Image (tube, rainbow, N blue to C red):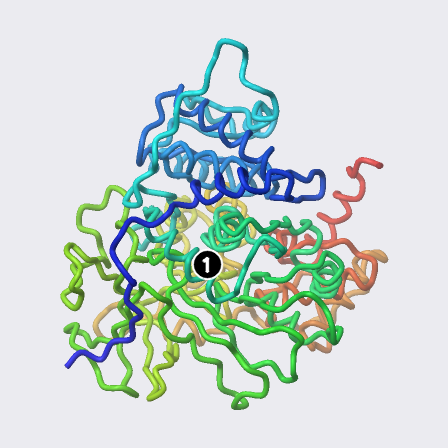
Amino acid sequence: MLQASHTPRADSARRTTVPERIAAWAARRPAAVAVVDEHTSVTYGDFQQRVDALADRLRRLGVRRDERVAVYLERSADCVLAAAAVLASGAAYLMLDVRQPAAWTRLLLDRGAARVVITRPDLWATTAVEGLSTVDVTTARRPLPIGAPPRPAEPVPDDAAAYLNYTSGSSGAPKGVLVEHAGLANLVDWYLQRHRVGPDDHLTQLARPSFDAFALEVWPCLAAGAALHVVPPALTAAPAELRDWLCRSGITVAFVPTPLAEQLLELPWPDRGRLRDVLVGGDRLTAYPGAALPFRLHNNYGPTECTVVATCCEVPPGGPPGEPPPIGTPIPGVSAYVLDERRRPVADGEPGELHLGGVGVARGYLGDPERNGFWADPFSAEPAARAYATGDLVRRAPDGQLHFLGRVDDQVQVRGIRVDPGEVEPVLRSHPTVDRAVVVGRDRQLVAYVTAGDGPVDPAALRRFLQARLPDYLVPAVVVPLDELPTTGHGKVDRRALAGLPLRRPEAEPPPEPADDLERVLTEAWLEVLDATEVHPHDNFFEIGGDSLRVSRLVGRSRQRGLVLRPDDVYAHPVLRDLAAALREQRSTAVPR
């Protein structure tokens, strides 16, 4: 007998899509605020007019159902507007990260077969990408020219693709996941019901647009007629300042990536405030909150392949010490199966791989006829139902709660993004000084072990080489040169042995005095965050115990000392003296306001 957790759909009728819901609120409450960022506030009436103008422009360019349209913009009201216009046009949006290298942007555009991009001319010029039709998002602020009536919009079927999100692939290339409107509508239905969101609510947009949590933050909010607040960039790695902003802005429901949320939970909170629900996800929540909170905490789990959220639970304070909270039970419309290697159900309490079914399962990988990981769901009564093998090892408790145990493969979570280390290895091996390369996950970071090819290995040069070709979360925090890679008795690389190797050789000399006040302040912050007795100017933050959680803490401690530091600075320059030099350069080139 199959032991599955599921909440079936109430019916199989067509769901109202996100663009239809937004348009309904624009007609009902045109003067209500839709999106707010640091520079502008847009009402639902204005938002819909701009969406219609951009969608009309896309249709005039011949954009059709299921076609991918790229969005290349910073987190902003314009970014939200552009994505909404793509949905309204019937196409699927592909959100690109403006902070990633141009080579990565070109790769995603090519693999997604995108021929149109919504952007700003000045921003797009920085990519040096040619051959695409560009739509200037600022033109949506102007009315259509006289004599150019808008082309009528057609209803978007709920089996059409809504967005394309890329996830890491072991083949050395990212995998594009196509999510349909039905899955997105199901996510919205669940969110609005669980969190009781309505037009008087205020929600946040904090995640990178290229992260699938963008869909969780944006579309339930606008589908409910609520106000979406784009979190200022300076607050995304400053827990105390973010807390104050949430309270000051009257935010009622917020999503916060798990590493940042764990720091927020350690802070004192005012007894009263409007914030009632905080959703976390993207990484494993490691502990229960230690004290009562003035809001409900929700732990969300879900791979990109299953429309952002597949399971969830409320996390009470004061849970079992040393035990991480569960990942919950399936949301409505999603089924969870715990299966053995032959895809047979296991008993409650036994470990097994988590497989997901239901309306939330994505269409599959773009251009992958084998649909690796996707398979026909034999446990569903729905025709052509799909299931997805997550690769996550779990056990189901007697109360139905699923508990995460680890991975069945080598994938790791890096800054809330699921990463396959095998995607980095071929890029490393393409460098002439590298003969062999193996990448493993350690302490929420990637570590590369390499043997020399044509010339000596320079770890710093290799990281710069990767930074020009890969997104930041795929660049190993540490590169370790080895004379040879350890192997098992069968001649394969012994990854467990690699994970046990020291990341650096002990320093024989005591560290010198900091070069200046900036390096001294940075050193003090490192010592505090790493709980170390000494730090050398040439130390790599990640070689001496740093990880993504400590990066966030380092940013906070540095700000307390008057030093403006971003997480990206640490990832790009993990060596203390290099980081100090980069900050010094930023100060010298900063434009006075």
Residue behind mark 1: 417
Q: Amino acid at mark 1?
A: Ile
Q: Is residue 458 visible?
A: no
Residue shown at the point (18%, 46%) measured from the top left: 369
Who is closer to the viewer here, 59 or 587?
Answer: 59
Badge 1: residue crowd in 10 Å (few <14, some 14–19, many ≥20): some
Left or right of residue 256, residue 373 in this image: left
Who is closer to the viewer here, 22 or 325?
Answer: 22
Residue shown at the point (65%, 51%) measured from the top left: 231
Query: Would you place residue 251 above or below residue 218 in this image?
Result: below
Q: Position of residue 253 (x, y in %)?
A: 59, 62
Q: Residue furthest top?
A: 147
Q: Position of residue 532 (x, y in %)?
A: 70, 76
Q: Is residue 114 visible?
A: yes
Query: Would you place residue 104 above or below residue 182 in this image?
Result: above
Secondary structure, mark 1, is: strand
Position of the N terminus, as image quadrant, is: bottom left
Q: Which quadrant of the view contains residue 26?
A: top right
Residue shown at the point (40%, 71%) measured from the top left: 498
Who is closer to the viewer here, 520 or 318?
Answer: 318
Q: Which quadrant of the view contains residue 242?
A: bottom right
Q: Which quadrant of the view contains residue 306?
A: bottom left
Residue shown at the point (76%, 73%) measured from the top left: 270
Query: Would you place residue 195 above or below residue 249 in this image?
Result: below
Left or right of residue 514, residue 222 in this image: left
Q: Position of residue 516 (x, y in %)?
A: 84, 56
